[in-house]
Image (cartoon, rainbow, N blue to C red):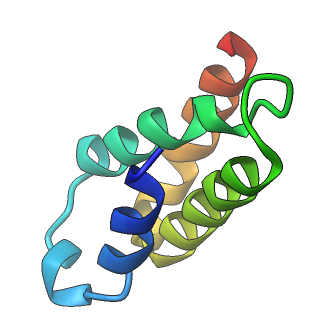
Amino acid sequence: GGFHFIFVGLVRLPKLYRNFNEAQYKFIFVIALPYTDPSQFQHFAVYLAYHVIVMWFVKCRLMYRKQLVPFIIKVCLYF
């Protein structure tokens, strides 16, 4: 679960992800989304997972958001 803190910190470094492509954003969401299950993880881990997802979604380029929404929904339904 330590990924939360890394991804929360990295989202504050725009130079790091300035050239991210859609696949790199998907990688972040694939890691964070399983932690949104409150029956599997403690409340704080679930909260941080949602925080990571929201922050990275807001920070990603607008042109990727349209493609990421169905992907995020698909991954959510899987878990």
Hey, which quadrant is residue 26 in on the image? top left
Q: Residue furthest top?
A: 78
Among the 4 quarters of the image, the one containing residue 18? bottom left
Residue name at image x 35 percent, y 51 percent: 25
Q: Position of residue 33 (x, y in %)?
A: 59, 36
Q: Nearer the viewer, residue 69 or 12?
A: 12
Q: Is residue 29 above or below residue 7?
A: above
Q: Is 64 situated above or below 34? A: below
Task: Report the residue at 56% width, 51% height from top.
Answer: 66
Query: Which quadrant of the figure contains the C terminus?
Result: top right
Nearer-the-camera pick, 48 or 29 = 48
Residue 41, given in percent of the width and then of the height, sits at 72, 33
Residue 38, image x, y percentages = 84, 34
Q: Looking at the picture, how far across and down is residue 55, in whole percent?
A: 56, 72
Q: Residue at x 57, y 74 (%)?
A: 58
Left or right: 54, with 3 as reference point: right
Report the front residue among 73 and 27.
27
Who's the residue at 60% across and 29% down the image?
34
